[in-house]
């Protein structure tokens, strides 16, 4: 099988490598590669939202011909292209060399979403960005991994704020010809189409591929003519609201995804499921072994020994549960191919606390997979308590759910200006061994003023980006002036700036800081030491309570009483996330415990010197050391949780954060504040990187699973 590479007819022969690089997301975490495209035409790069595919297609041939003769451009281009080719040379992660050879089939990684770059909107939030960061780091470490997911031509939710502050959703179909994605072709030059096994009426998927450095990501697409209309819409957008369509999505992802790997001849030794959406992939692995002569129990044991399952959801409603009759509709005949009675199969998905509720996907995969983990130390504890009854008679602390704390891909999330600063003081090769904690101690070598000046440059860049967004919306839609104000046009880069960007659902408590508006108002409009708050995020289309919280924030932001010190930036996505985590002064996080599984946005901010103010939940349980930010929440009880937590936030701002930020004394900057910034960088860089995360998966799970694979 081969994939077709897009043609860039404007490219002269001397610059054909530009097309090659544009089609591999390697450029998205290598600033020098992005600079090659940017230097062709800075305005085109900006207008095309840093998308090299689109930029190359739109540039006139004359500009490319000129670049092909420019010695300065060619020196940079040739160097970056050689680095790209060297990066792609085949190798094997040294930590896996004792259990597999270079050509040994590796890991198949399944996820319902991937946050890789805003030109590929296949993500809804944290789960997708975690998956994207994970496969990027597997590429960097040369882990033999292949990833499987969905093509979502309509993405997740594109957001517009209505005149009354209500979130509206709109569609903007993905232009597949202007994104780093390609069709997978068969030997006849036709796009590969695969039938999902044992599902009637039949469902077919076409196959697309994204190259993520060394890792191939295969995406399934049901929007093809051979499917009937209902089947065509299975992969239209993330997380279908209709319960039957959601089940069909998960059947296609799990069973169809395994069939695609089989059809493409891509073998794997172990399976890693990122959440339970693709859990039916386990059934296909078992079916293959049953057809090879194993009993169901033998096949289940072998498959379990070589399956890793990462659960991310401590919220009960976040786990998919399907009615038994619906499961019967799709799996009655399939069960016979497993050598299993249908009722016996259904029991595998029963939660013992709610046996009549339906087939619980998480309960199913927790029973079937042999290696289980939560995504922070705290979440591991919560998951063991939440699911302990699946192991009757086993003490809670012995429930076999381990943890691997999430991390962020440092090359993706470190801002290029900050990268230059690190290169200067941590050494030019620091990124090659950034999981070494001693490297990060060199952060103390950075002069306070250089770090602060870099941060202020990023803060101004953030506010400029917010104003440009508001300007464009005003031009395009003749936006109501009060909504323009609420969009951040009055923000001041000299003011202490708080960032809050999460999915808008009730347990995230986005409006907690608005609990006592009179008290907050005093902080916002203080003459000498004011604060300002930037909110961003989306509510699920079906989540009206989340939309009401969002609407309240928007309408508070447009109220002149608060002096333009509150902003809501609409249509939050990967590109604006980059600006936000780099440019605010402090990152606020206040979900209702223990519902934060991990929370990687605070890690991204901390990596760039932005301290966290967070409730003690998720990763902050491990990350907070008393010197890298502020924590609260231990004093709360269930009966007064919101009031007590809001009081703690106000008190921290009034007594500690605001005085410290504005305290410069005889210096131009607050040296104590910069000290907290440095501590934040050291903690996040050394302990909460995707490199540390992937290494943990290798040492805790992958090596053991590979040792148990069949020879």
Image (cartoon, helix red, strand yellow):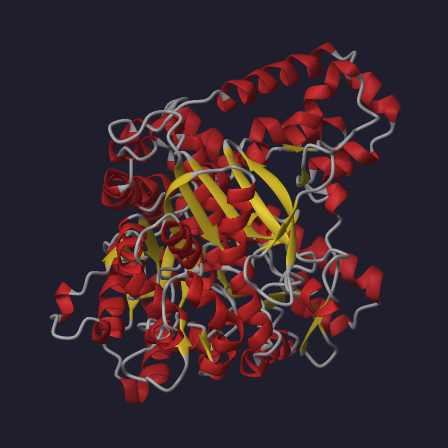
Q: Which quadrant of the figure contains the N terminus?
A: top right
Is residue 122 placed above or below 49 in the rendered structure? below
Q: Can residue 583 be seen in this snapshot?
A: no
Taking the image as shown, residue 581 lies to the left or right of residue 568, namely left
Closest to the observer, 366 or 693: 366
Q: Residue at x 62, y 63 (%)?
A: 156
Taking the image as shown, residue 373 lies to the left or right of residue 532, namely left
Q: Residue at x 61, y 79 (%)?
A: 551
Q: x and y percent of residue 37 in the render?
A: 69, 29
Is residue 422 placed above or below 689 in the rendered structure? above
Closest to the observer, 698 or 208: 208
Closest to the observer, 230 or 633: 230
Q: x and y percent of residue 291 in the render?
A: 40, 52
Q: Can residue 441 be seen in this snapshot?
A: yes
Taking the image as shown, residue 599 lies to the left or right of residue 517, namely left
Q: Which quadrant of the figure contains the C terminus?
A: top left
Is residue 167 placed above or below 420 in the rendered structure? below
Q: Residue at x 80, y 34 (%)?
A: 57
The quadrant in which residue 55 appears is: top right
């Amino acid at each position: 099988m081969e994939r077709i590479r897009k043609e860039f007819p404007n490219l002269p022969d001397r610059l054909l490598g530009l097309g090659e690089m544009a089609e591999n997301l390697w450029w998205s975490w290598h600033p020098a590669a992005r600079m090659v495209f940017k230097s062709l035409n800075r305005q085109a790069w900006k207008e095309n939202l840093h998308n090299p595919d689109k930029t190359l297609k739109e540039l006139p041939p004359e500009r490319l011909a000129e670049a092909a003769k420019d010695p300065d451009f060619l020196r940079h281009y040739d160097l970056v292209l050689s680095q790209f080719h060297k990066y792609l040379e085949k190798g094997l992660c040294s930590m896996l060399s004792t259990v597999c050879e270079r050509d040994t089939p590796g890991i198949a990684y399944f996820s319902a979403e991937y946050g890789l770059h805003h030109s590929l909107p296949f993500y809804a939030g944290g789960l997708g960005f975690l998956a994207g960061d994970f496969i990027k780091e597997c590429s960097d470490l040369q882990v033999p991994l292949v990833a499987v997911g969905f093509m979502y031509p309509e993405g997740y939710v594109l957001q517009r704020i209505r005149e009354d502050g209500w979130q509206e959703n709109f569609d903007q179909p993905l232009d597949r010809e202007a994104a780093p994605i390609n069709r997978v072709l068969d030997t006849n030059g036709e796009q590969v189409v695969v039938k999902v096994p044992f599902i009637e009426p039949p469902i077919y998927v076409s196959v697309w591929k994204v190259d993520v450095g060394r890792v191939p990501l295969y995406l399934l697409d049901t929007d093809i003519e051979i499917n009937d209309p209902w089947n065509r819409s299975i992969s239209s957008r993330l997380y279908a609201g209709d319960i039957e369509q959601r089940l069909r999505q998960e059947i296609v992802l799990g069973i169809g995804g395994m069939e695609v790997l089989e059809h493409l001849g891509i073998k794997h030794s172990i399976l890693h499921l990122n959440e339970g959406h693709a859990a039916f992939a386990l059934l296909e692995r078992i079916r293959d072994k049953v057809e090879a002569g194993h009993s169901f129990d033998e096949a289940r044991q072998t498959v379990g020994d070589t399956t890793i399952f990462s659960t991310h959801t401590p919220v009960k409603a976040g786990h998919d549960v399907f009615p038994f009759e619906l499961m019967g509709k799709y799996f009655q005949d399939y069960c016979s191919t497993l050598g299993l009675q249908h009722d016996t199969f259904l029991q595998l998905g029963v939660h013992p606390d709610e046996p009549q509720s339906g087939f619980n996907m998480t309960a199913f995969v927790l029973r079937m997979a042999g290696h289980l983990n939560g995504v922070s130390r705290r979440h591991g504890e919560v998951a063991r308590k939440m699911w302990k009854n699946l192991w009757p008679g086993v003490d809670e602390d012995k429930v076999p759910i381990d943890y691997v704390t999430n991390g962020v891909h440092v090359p993706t999330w470190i801002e290029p200006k900050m990268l230059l600063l690190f290169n200067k003081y941590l050494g030019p090769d620091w990124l090659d061994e950034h999981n070494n904690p001693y490297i990060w101690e060199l952060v103390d070598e950075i002069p306070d003023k250089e770090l602060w000046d870099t941060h202020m440059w990023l803060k101004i860049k953030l506010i400029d980006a917010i104003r440009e967004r508001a300007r464009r919306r005003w031009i395009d839609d003749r936006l109501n002036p009060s909504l323009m104000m609420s969009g951040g046009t009055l923000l001041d880069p000299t003011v202490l700036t708080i960032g809050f960007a999460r999915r808008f659902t009730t347990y995230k408590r986005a409006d907690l800081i608005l609990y006592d508006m009179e008290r907050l108002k005093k902080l916002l409009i203080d003459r000498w030491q004011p604060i300002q708050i930037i909110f961003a995020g989306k509510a699920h289309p079906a989540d009206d309570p989340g939309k009401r919280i969002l609407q309240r924030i928007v309408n508070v932001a447009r109220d002149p009483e608060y002096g333009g010190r509150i902003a809501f930036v609409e249509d939050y996505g990967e590109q604006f996330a980059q600006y936000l985590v780099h440019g605010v002064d402090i990152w606020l996080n206040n979900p209702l415990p223990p519902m934060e599984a991990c929370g990687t946005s605070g890690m991204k901010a901390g990596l760039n010197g932005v301290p966290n103010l967070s409730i003690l939940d998720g990763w902050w349980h491990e990350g907070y050391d008393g010197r890298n930010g502020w924590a609260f929440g231990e004093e709360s009880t269930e009966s007064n949780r919101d009031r007590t937590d809001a009081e703690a936030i106000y008190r921290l701002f009034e007594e500690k954060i605001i005085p410290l930020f504005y305290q410069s004394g005889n210096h131009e900057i607050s040296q104590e504040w910069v000290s907290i910034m440095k501590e934040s960088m050291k903690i996040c860089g050394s302990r909460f990187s995707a490199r540390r995360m992937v290494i943990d998966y290798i040492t805790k799970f992958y090596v053991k699973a590979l040792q148990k694979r069949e020879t």
